[in-house]
Image (cartoon, coloured by chain):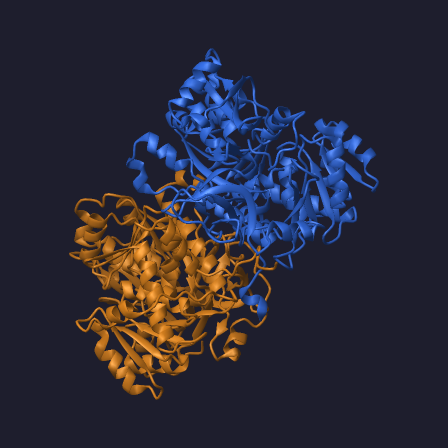
Chain colours: A orange, B blue
Amino acid sequence: MPGLSCEPLTPTAFLERSARVFGDRIAVIDGDRRCTYRELYQRCRRLAGVLVSAGATAGSRVAVLAPNTGVLLEAHYGVPLAGAVLVTLNIRQSPEELAYIVEHSGASVLLYDYELGDAARQLEGLVSTRLRLVESNGPSREYEELLAGAPPVATPVEDELSVLSINYTSGTTGKPKGVMYHHRAAYLQSIAMAWHAGLAPESVFLWTLPMFHGHGWCFTWAVTAAGGTHLCLRKVVPADIWRLMREEGVTHLCAAPTVLTMLAYHPAAEVDPPPRPIQVCTGGGPPSPALLRRLADLHVDVAHMYGMTESHGPIALCEWRPEWDALPLERRAQLKARQGVETITAQPMRVLAADGRDVASDGKAVGEVAIRGNSLMLGYYKDPAATERAAPDGWFRTGDLGVMHPDGYVEISDRAKDIIISGGENIASVEVENAVATHPAVRQAAVIAAPDEKWGEVPEAYVELKDDHTVTEEELIHHVRGLLAHFKAPRRIVFGPLPTTSTGKVQKFLLRDKAWTGTEKRVH
Amino acid sequence: MPGLSCEPLTPTAFLERSARVFGDRIAVIDGDRRCTYRELYQRCRRLAGVLVSAGATAGSRVAVLAPNTGVLLEAHYGVPLAGAVLVTLNIRQSPEELAYIVEHSGASVLLYDYELGDAARQLEGLVSTRLRLVESNGPSREYEELLAGAPPVATPVEDELSVLSINYTSGTTGKPKGVMYHHRAAYLQSIAMAWHAGLAPESVFLWTLPMFHGHGWCFTWAVTAAGGTHLCLRKVVPADIWRLMREEGVTHLCAAPTVLTMLAYHPAAEVDPPPRPIQVCTGGGPPSPALLRRLADLHVDVAHMYGMTESHGPIALCEWRPEWDALPLERRAQLKARQGVETITAQPMRVLAADGRDVASDGKAVGEVAIRGNSLMLGYYKDPAATERAAPDGWFRTGDLGVMHPDGYVEISDRAKDIIISGGENIASVEVENAVATHPAVRQAAVIAAPDEKWGEVPEAYVELKDDHTVTEEELIHHVRGLLAHFKAPRRIVFGPLPTTSTGKVQKFLLRDKAWTGTEKRVH
């Protein structure tokens, strides 16, 4: 009786449960449409039926090109219920990039949102393989009609370590890599997210974070596990978000600090506060103390999380200790800016020196953050060499530099490539960014290494000011010098909006590329 | 790199995490002693060191005979950290019963509480095997001295499906059976309990439920996973419990309905209410609507759970739907008395007819509740035949009779052996009990089948009255006839205290044995 006590773990089980337990509750709000958990489960099984009827077999890849719609959410259940593998595409990428990903994944079906019809057809023209296109949400009603005509299908998972999805990294250098997610890890990660975010049946989760970004850190399944409501959002428009918070009683959202900055300083934030307290999970960079202070004033609670595509989203969070509540806001913000400790289902992080040994837990010795365990990917699709390189000794190297504090919390000082080496001294760009951001006129700042004949590299700051605020380059440099060692202060400041990715991360590599154009190749 | 993305699941991982994340927080309060998570982890690793030094090897059995002390909690980590298997003994059992269990399990070490020294030594004299006795908490300070002299040990788990513990069933008929728990199931069950009980670092969990009862439904590990405080309790004394609720800010406890009844009607309940809202998880029998009403008045929230030793404790709960909050109290109590749906990590329950097929989901058709999946035991220790009998088709038969409601919630009507067959009609004893308990003078009632020449069986009630209340047999029978079909009303009522097990379940088999003495063997 091997099956008596061991059922494969899969995140689709959460939908099956919520359909029965919370069948009449609203699972999805997508524009004017509302769908109960019973209906969602029925639609997802019919999507599985569509795919199986179209020839999908165990392990077939199905690609989806869509903003955060109910259909994209349905694909998170319908594709695995067909026994197929989900490939969610980043809608900000070019047709050429997407064509590479679709071909590399070997997807045979492309489900796309009607707003992205042009991109989908361009992509179709670029791939050499045969691709079945299915349009959703458009006047053609193709997706709805296919659903209506399909039998419900729910293929059981036989191996919890089988591939659930392939998520392609954004690939700032080289070709995107396909991160293979599996059922067991996605299941455990979903539970961890539901637990740490405090999701419940009463929760209303606003989809500001793209679902194509590591399946929205697995909240695509976590919200369902809790029986909460998915509130879809096609575009991150601050005025819309503040309206939805009020109208729909939003309780949770996830967003990068840049998106939070945009929200926090938007005029709509000053209107009536939302009716319910809001729990925000942030990641992709540490929120600046200034931003944390601002959000505290708006009664928005922030959980700071840390992770990457390779770890099914957050593998760590700045787990809050109740005794910290009594500390002054400034100190609380400092503590919260740390990446923290592993989630409840993950394994402890390590900070490794170049020789593979742990650095001292003194909050000073810098090393590379390394992770492993139940949140980790199976590996890179069709690229065992890259997998091996990323985890040479079984510990996945994140590329993030950080320290281990005496209390066991990790703090990232910088991306390996974001460190500035000036006259032989290391400068953490994040430290300079936080100093710049303390100036009352600054909305957000990005600091990079710029070439310098004498020092090799020097810090250069890119700064976005708050509306109706001004400050000169000289004043701001002076401000930073009052806070940090002089060699850490930016040599030059460029004012203007910062370039960000689809997920709201500042694209420092664009700033770096510009700064280094015409200069010899950087040594690191 | 098979290890990169798959670490064995084990509940000892929660202690390792909480020791790092919540190191300075109080993990255990045991009388006058308080111990932080850092200290608890250190003590547990030293206990593992003691066991390994004493010769424990992978899979060795270590028995513990203790009330709910800090030492018993430590055994839940120290024994598996030694790679050994935990056997927690029921302190209410006789030395003869305990000797059978110790011999059957093959335990080589018996860790006992000094208050149970006589029982431990008697037991030692009864077993034919060699048993190393270790006393804890007594003037000998044996346990503390062994700990102080031992090296810290933490043996990694290699196979998450390996045996973590053996829990012996109370065995109302025949010999006790050894239920084998495993690391994976206990891990998932702990997460489910932490999730459904809403445990958090601020939680203070009062140990009213014996830890030797399925490891306190795995709350031994769940409370640690959340970073909450274990508040130990040697004896269930209502006045002490109400005092602790106030003095220590208790937030959670688990107890059978009988214990809750004792608490709810104790004079101390009327004094100042506890400073924090209390979440109670109950199981082992449905709480009567009258009890639920009383607890609601005391601002105690009750989660009704359902499970058994074989399922690592609760496999189901009456998952509360927010929309039910608006219903009248009477209806809410009816809904909450249902056993409900599977927990977040379990598989759906079924209600099976004798032919192994599902009964209709109409809330009327009675069948046997059957379970399987990630919460189930590996099997009965050294008894594959009993395992096979219990789950003939891979579905474990619980011995509980129930119905499947149209909304997917299961409601137990009775234990298979608690059904009363009177003149060919089935009478659910729980229905009669609930009717009896609606009388204002009744504290609790147990109804059994008594022999009857004409009808075969008739309902007989055993009733415990509230202090300073009286009612006659005739009045009470009249009261029930006003609520139920006349043939369901008790023919006879016996007033007096009810016999209960160590876990607070009414021992109906004792009442039945008495009622049937001198009568021919019952047919079912």
Residue occupying image coordinates x 84% and y 40%: B128
Q: Nearer the viewer, residue B63 or B455?
A: B455
Residue A94: percent from the left, percent from the top? Answer: 28, 79
Residue occupying image coordinates x 46% and y 53%: A340
Residue B507 versus residue A22 in the image, above or below:
above
Residue B390 versus residue A121 in the image, above or below:
above
**Quarter of the image where one finds residue B200:** top left
User: Viewed as shown, does residue B96 lie left or right of A324?
Assistant: right
Q: Residue furthest bottom?
A: A128
Question: The N terminus of chain A appears in which quarter of the rendering?
Answer: bottom right
Residue occupying image coordinates x 44% and y 17%: B476
Residue A90: percent from the left, percent from the top? Answer: 32, 72
Q: Is residue B31 visible?
A: no
Residue A145 versus residue B315 in the image, above or below:
below
Question: The C terminus of chain A appears in which quarter of the rendering?
Answer: bottom left
Residue B328: percent from the left, percent from the top? Answer: 30, 31
User: Viewed as shown, does residue A393 lie left or right of A304?
Assistant: right
Q: Nearer the viewer, residue B267 or B79?
A: B267
- Please give the count of numbered marks on the rendered protein: 0
Residue A30: percent from the left, percent from the top? Answer: 23, 59
**Quarter of the image where one finds residue B66:** top right
Q: Is residue A173 visible?
A: yes
